[in-house]
Every structure is written in C-alpha cells, then in structure tokens.
Amino acid sequence: MELDSVVHGTARGLEMAGIGIIVAGALFALVSTLGRLGKVNEEEAYYHFRRRLGRAILLGLELLVAADIVGTVMVRPTMENVLVLAVIVLIRTFLSVSLTVEVEGRWPWQVTRRTDE
C-alpha cells in the first residue's frame, strides 16, 4: 500500500469519526434531554441539552482539525496549501474556544472542577 493512500484514508477516517461524534452526540443530547423533561423544569432541560450538544461539537471539531492537519501533511506543502490549513485551523479553533466559553462558562485554559451530570 502506498503511503499517500494510507494517510488519505487516515484523514478520511478522522473526518468521518468527527462527523459521527457530532451526529451521535446531538442524538444523545436530544434523547437525554427528553428523558429529563418530566423531572426538571424547562430551563434546566435546555441548559442540559446545550451542554451535551456543545461537548459533542467540541470533540467532533478536535477530530476535524486533526483530519485537516493529517490531510495537508501529505499534499504538496505549497504556500497556498499551508495558508488554507492555517485558516481552517484558525476558524475551527475559534469555534472551539467560543463553544467552551458558551457551554462551560470558562476559558479553555482555566482549570475547573469536574461535576458529574
């Protein structure tokens, strides 16, 4: 097997895993929240849904960034390809930081105590 095809397959696998985690996480958040609706008020259920969904998107974004990096490594490293990768990583990193602040109420580099839900 050629190294290019292995790396391309790895990048594709990471992309599919990232998408799968986002979709599965959204479904899990929805089902989990629907199960809580009778036990908690509407505001708490909404907060629960947003946290679960946000976490799934964050994890999926991390895998998508990894896929972009792996995929770009094997492409001819032209200045254009590197700039495109930099822009993609910058946008996804901004989304990740924004989601962390929105969902967890803290900056990603701040330490927080874990709470079990």
Image: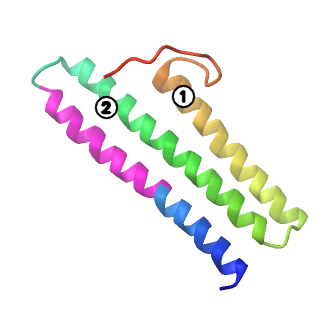
Residue type at mark 2: give it. Answer: Phe
What coloring was used for the rendering?
rainbow
In x, y percent, where is residue 52?
Answer: 36, 33
The residue that disc 1 covers is 100
The residue that disc 2 covers is 49
Question: Is residue 24 covered in magenta?
Answer: yes
Q: Residue at x 17, y 18 (%)?
A: 40
Question: Is residue 42 covered in magenta?
Answer: no
Asked which secondary structure carries label 2, the reply is helix
Q: Is residue 97 above or below residue 17?
A: above
Circle 1: is it few (<14), some (14-19), or many (20+) Cα within 10 Å? some
Give the residues in magenta. 18-37
- Quarter of the rendering occupied by the C terminus: top left
Q: Residue at x 47, y 42 (%)?
A: 57
Q: Is residue 111 above or below residue 15?
A: above
Asked which secondary structure carries label 1, the reply is helix
Residue type at mark 1: give it. Answer: Thr
Residue 109 falls in which quadrant of the image?
top right
